[in-house]
């Protein structure tokens, strides 16, 4: 029996790319270090039968920087092809802007690229999955705003305490 493979069709496990981001603040104690994220991505791909081609890393990068404008994020956006998979450890490691998250996801859906968010087991190719994704993206953006607010308050308090130094 002969099996015909259409031109461009892949043989073997689907190609996957991991994405890791660590903000400028030290986060190793929070389980968000690049190594921890990479280990989680590798284990996830193995469990799902995905061939992990590369893990792209943006160390010391703010989540407020648009995904495609980050070093590794921009490379990743240019690398993915129809049928590829992108795997991130958690939503907030990829995005802190709802608009950027939704725009990136919409582009990947048009390209037939599947997104996997390890701590978010919802299929973003369904209407319910997209709704839940959008809500959580809004929460991630809100959380980033709260972090910025707390940092500013701490800096002001330190200035007052040190007499403006």
Image (cartoon, helix red, strand yellow):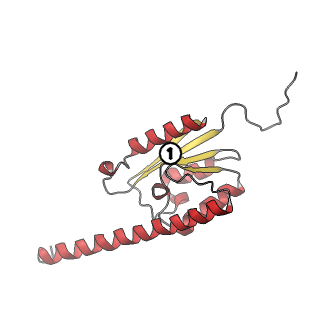
Percent x, y for residue 25? 32, 57
| Residue at image point 15% right, 78% down | 160
Vertical order, 65 against 155 (above or below):
above
Percent x, y for residue 103? 61, 64
- Residue wearing tag 1: 56
33 with respect to 67 (left or right)? left
- Residue 99 falls in image quadrant: bottom right
| Residue at image point 46% right, 65% down | 140
| Residue at image point 65% right, 55% down | 108
Tally of numbered discs: 1
Q: Quadrant of the N terminus?
A: top right
Farthest right residue in view: 1
Vertical order, 129 against 10 (above or below):
below
Vertical order, 21 against 147 (above or below):
above
141 with respect to 81 (left or right)? left
| Residue at image point 62% right, 45% down | 85
Percent x, y for residue 14? 66, 38
Question: Disc 1 on helix, strand or loop?
Answer: strand
Vertical order, 148 against 6 (above or below):
below
Farthest top residue in view: 1
134 with respect to 159 (left or right)? right
Percent x, y for residue 64? 45, 65
Specify few, some or many for label 1: CA neighbours under 10 Å numbering under 14, 14-19, or 20 or more: some
Q: Quadrant of the C terminus?
A: bottom left
């Amino acid at each position: 029996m002969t099996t015909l493979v259409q031109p461009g069709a892949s043989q073997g496990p689907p190609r996957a790319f991991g994405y890791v981001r660590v903000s400028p603040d030290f986060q190793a104690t929070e389980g968000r270090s690049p190594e921890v994220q990479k280990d989680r991505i590798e284990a996830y791909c193995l469990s799902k039968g995905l061939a992990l081609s590369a893990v792209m890393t943006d160390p010391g990068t703010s989540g407020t920087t648009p995904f495609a404008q980050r070093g590794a994020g921009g490379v990743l956006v240019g690398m993915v092809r129809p049928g590829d998979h992108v795997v991130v450890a958690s939503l907030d490691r990829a995005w802190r802007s709802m608009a950027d998250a939704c725009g990136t996801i919409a582009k990947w859906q048009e390209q037939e690229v599947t997104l996997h968010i390890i701590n978010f087991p919802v299929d973003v190719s369904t209407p319910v999955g997209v709704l839940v994704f959008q809500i959580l993206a809004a929460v991630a953006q809100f959380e980033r705003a709260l972090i910025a607010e707390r940092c500013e308050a701490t800096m002001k308090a330190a200035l007052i305490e040190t007499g403006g130094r």
